[in-house]
Image: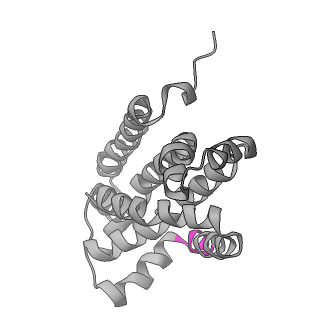
Amino acid sequence: TLVVISLVAAILIAVPLGIISARVAQLGQVILSVTGAIQTIPSLALLVFMIPIFGINEPPAIAALFLYSLLPIVRNTYTGLIDIPTTMRESAEALGLPSSVRLRKIELPLASRSILAGIKTSAVINVGFATIGAFIGAGGYGQPILTGLRLDDHGLIMEGAIPAAILALMIQWAFEFAERWLVPKGLRLQPVE
C-alpha cells in the first residue's frame, strides 16, 4: 500500500516534470538538480524530516517514498524525450502538428520504454525503502524485520525480508509484462537469438 500510493503520486508529478525538463532547458536543470539532491538524503534522515510535517505512521513514509520516487521517473522521462532523433521531431513539426499532439502521439510513445524503466526502478527501490518505514510505525514488511532486530530473531527478520524481496521481483515482472501493452510494438526489445 505504501509503495502503490507513493508511486502513483510520483508518476502524476514526475512525468510532467520530466516533460518540462526536456522542453525548458534551464528549468530542466533546476528540476533534475533538486530531485537529485533529494535522492542523496539518507532514507532514515528523510523519514525523520517528514515526522514534524506529517506526524508518525504511514503519512511520513508515503511522503518520503514519493520524494525518493521522483528522480528515476523525472530523469528517464527527460532522457527518453531528449533522445528522440531530431529528424523525427522535425518531420512531426513539418506536418504541422501542434506541440501537444506531437507530445501525445509521437514523443511520449517514442519515450515510453525509458519512462516505464524509470517507473519500474522507482517501484523496486520503494519496496526496499518501505521496510524502513517500520521505524516510524508505518508497519508493512519492515515490522517483522524491526522486531527481529530487537529480539535478535533471524526467523522473524526473514519473515519480513523474504516477502519484501518477492514483492520487488513480482513488481519487476509485472512491469516487464505491462511493457507489452504500454510500449508500441516497434519499440519493444526483442530477445537475442
Q: In this picture, is 72 found above or below 63?
A: above
Where residue 7 appears, as percent x and y from the top left, is: 37, 58
As drawn, is 72 to the left or to the right of 139? right
Q: Residue at x 28, y 61 (%)?
A: 143
- Nearest the camera: 6 or 109? 109
Look at the magenta stretch and give its main secondary structure: helix
Q: In this picture, is 185 found above or below 36?
A: above
Which range is magenta?
37-42
As drawn, is 191 to the left or to the right of 89? left
State which quarter of the image contains the C terminus: top right
Q: Quick check: can you spot residue 118? A: no
Q: Residue at x 64, y 69 (%)?
A: 32
Q: Outermost residue toward the top?
A: 193
- Nearest the camera: 163 or 180? 180
As drawn, is 86 to the left or to the right of 134? right
Q: In this picture, is 119 found above or below 29?
A: above
Residue 31 colored in magenta in the image: no
As drawn, is 190 to the left or to the right of 160? right
Where residue 33 appears, as percent x and y from the top left, is: 66, 73
Q: Outermost residue toward the bottom?
A: 52
According to the image, what is the colour scheme of the structure? one colour
Counting the numbered discs, the total is 0
Where residue 157 appears, as percent x and y from the top left, is: 34, 51
Q: Quick check: can you spot residue 143? A: yes
Where residue 60 appears, as percent x and y from the top left, is: 34, 76
Q: Residue at x 47, y 77 (%)?
A: 46
- Nearest the camera: 127 or 78? 78
State which quarter of the image contains the N terminus: bottom left
Q: Residue at x 38, y 41 (%)?
A: 171
